[in-house]
Image: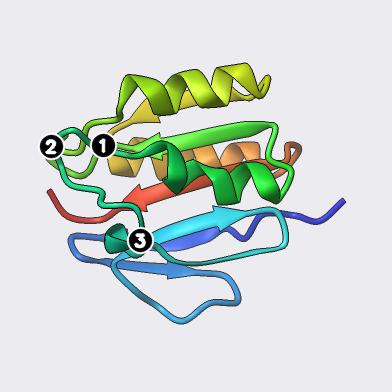
Amino acid sequence: MEKSPRVTHIAWGRMEVEGLQGGKDFKLYPGGGREWDWTEHGTRHDPGIQPGDVQELLDHGCTVVVLSRGMELRLKTMPATLQALRDAGVEVHVAETTEAVALYNRLAETERVGGLFHSTC
C-alpha cells in the first residue's frame, strides 16, 4: 500500500511534508501530494472547499479524508463537498489545521488517507 506523506512541521503560513518542497497549503494523498492552489476550483474562505478540490483525493484512492479549517477556523467546506465524499463512501473529518494535521498523521499509519491543509487563517 502506498503511504500518504507525513506532515513534519506546521506553523502559520508554512508546512513541511515528507518528500515535498515546503509551502503554505497542501493537498496530500497516498503516494504523494502537492501545493494546494485555491484558484483551480475557485476556493475562497466562504463558501469554502469546493467539490473539485477533493476529486484529486478520490482519484488517488483515499478512503479517509481530513479537511482543515485553517488556524483561525475561517475556511469553510461546502455541503456539496461533504456530500460528494460521503457518496464515494469516504470517511470525512473536518478540524482546525493543527488538529487536522495530527489526525492525518495518525491515520497515515494505517489508512489510505488524503487531506487538504490551509496553514493560515
The CA distance from mark 2 to mark 1 is 6 Å
The residue singled out by tag 1 in the image is 69
Dot 1 surroundings within 10 Å: few (below 14), some, or many (20 or more)? many
Residue 77: horizontal and vertical position, in percent? Answer: 30, 30
**Residue plotted at (36% across, 36% down):** 99
**Residue plotted at (29% across, 58% down):** 38
Residue 26: horizontal and vertical position, in percent? Answer: 41, 60
Disc 1 secondary structure class: loop
On the question of residue 108 being in view, the answer is no
What residue type is disc 1 on? Arg
Q: Nearer the viewer, residue 16 or 114?
A: 114
Q: Is residue 21 above or below residue 32?
A: below
Dot 3 surroundings within 10 Å: few (below 14), some, or many (20 or more)? few
Sequence-wise first label, 1 or 3: 3
What residue type is disc 3 on? Glu
**Residue plotted at (35% across, 39% down):** 50
What residue type is disc 2 on? Arg
Q: Is residue 71 left or right of residue 95?
A: left
Disc 2 secondary structure class: loop
Q: Nearer the viewer, residue 110 or 32?
A: 32
Sequence-wise first label, 2 or 1: 1
On the question of residue 82 being in view, the answer is yes
> In the orientation shown, which residue stands out farthest toward the bottom?
21
Sequence-wise first label, 3 or 2: 3
Do labels 3 and 2 touch, CB within 8 Å? no
Number of the label disc, if any, that sits on residue 74: 2
The residue singled out by tag 3 in the image is 40
